[in-house]
Image (cartoon, rainbow, N blue to C red):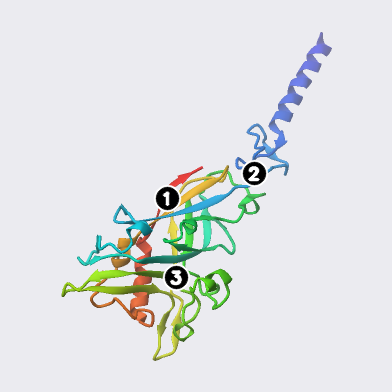
Amino acid sequence: MKATTIILSTLVLSLSFNSCNRKGCTDVLASNYNEKSKKDDGTCVYTPSTVTVNFTHNFNGSNVTASQFNGLSYVNANGQTLSFTKLQYSISDIRFYLPNGDSIYVDGSYHLVDLEDANSLLYTLPDMTEFIEGKDFKSTFTGIGFNYGFDATDNTSGAYDDLNLASWGWPEMIGGGYHQLKMEGRYKNTNGDTISYQFHNGSATKNSAGIFEPNYKFIKFNDASFDLSGPTTVEIKMNMANWFQNPNLWDLNVDFQTLMPNYDAQKRITQNANDVFSVGTISN
């Protein structure tokens, strides 16, 4: 009887010990995650996780597509009636933030959005598996960041064949590299005449001094929570009205053309980029 008791006790202790030390995959983002595993044994398997960015556009909440081009349908914060005939912009260096402040940086990511090209409104990032494999991600991501335009290191003239074909270069005489925004249309001036405007943004240059300044903007959203447990779509919204306000109220009667070599105008456009973007729907 005593021998039986000893054997049973030993068996219970052994099972308890093995349960407490059960090895397996402990990463919740892995396809073979085992909630009963207490110690990771390096066997995690990751299903390819695609992230697609969906770019949408509005004017103070009113949807804007290429089909709305040419109509004098919008009024900016300065009370000027205007239309849009072109909207193109670029983003780069997308990253996703963890609760501890660390981030996953999608190396080499950049994209040109053209409102007249429906295919450009969806951007599928490089396969994210290599960025998450082996990482200890035990929670959802909490934020998203990207550069509006290229940073100083990546903004190199002629470096990107697809952008060269898209005539996206910024003239060498005013800094070189690439545009980060081309927005064009027409507006009614103080005389009631309908005038064209070109709202282009890139490097800032002080021609008289020969000084060129990087003029990109890093955009970060801290209120974007999601995981990479499967294909994910992230909506990035642009409120086009905010190009004309926050913090700089824009007067098209003063600044409507020849803005590219205008140092002050270039700095003010980039400052306004801070409130142009927001995160919309995130779906798995």
Q: Quadrant of residue 239?
A: bottom left
Numbered disc 1: secondary structure = loop
Q: Which residue is mark 3?
A: 180
Report the quarter where the N terminus lies.
top right
In this view, the residue in front, 35 or 254, is 254
Q: Amino acid at mark 1?
A: Asp
- Provide the residue designation for mark 1: 223
Q: Nearer the viewer, mark 3 or mark 1?
A: 3
Q: CA distance from mark 2 to mark 1?
A: 26 Å
Which of 5/52 is in front?
52
Q: Is residue 208 above or below residue 130?
A: below
- Quick one: SS at disc 3? loop
- Tell me the residue at 46%/82% (across/down): 171
How far across and how far down the image is residue 59, in percent?
30, 57
Q: CA distance from mark 3 to mark 1?
A: 25 Å
Which residue was labeled with disc 2?
47
Residue 225 position, x and y percent, is 47, 46
In terms of image quadrants, where is residue 271? bottom left
Q: Name the residue at 80% across, 16% down.
A: 6
Which label's residue is closer to the chain start, 2 or 3?
2
Badge 3 or badge 1: first in the primary sequence: 3
Q: Give, as a three-letter code, the residue at label 3.
A: Gln
For this view, does 247 lie left or right of residue 155?
Answer: left
The amino acid beneath tag 2 is Thr
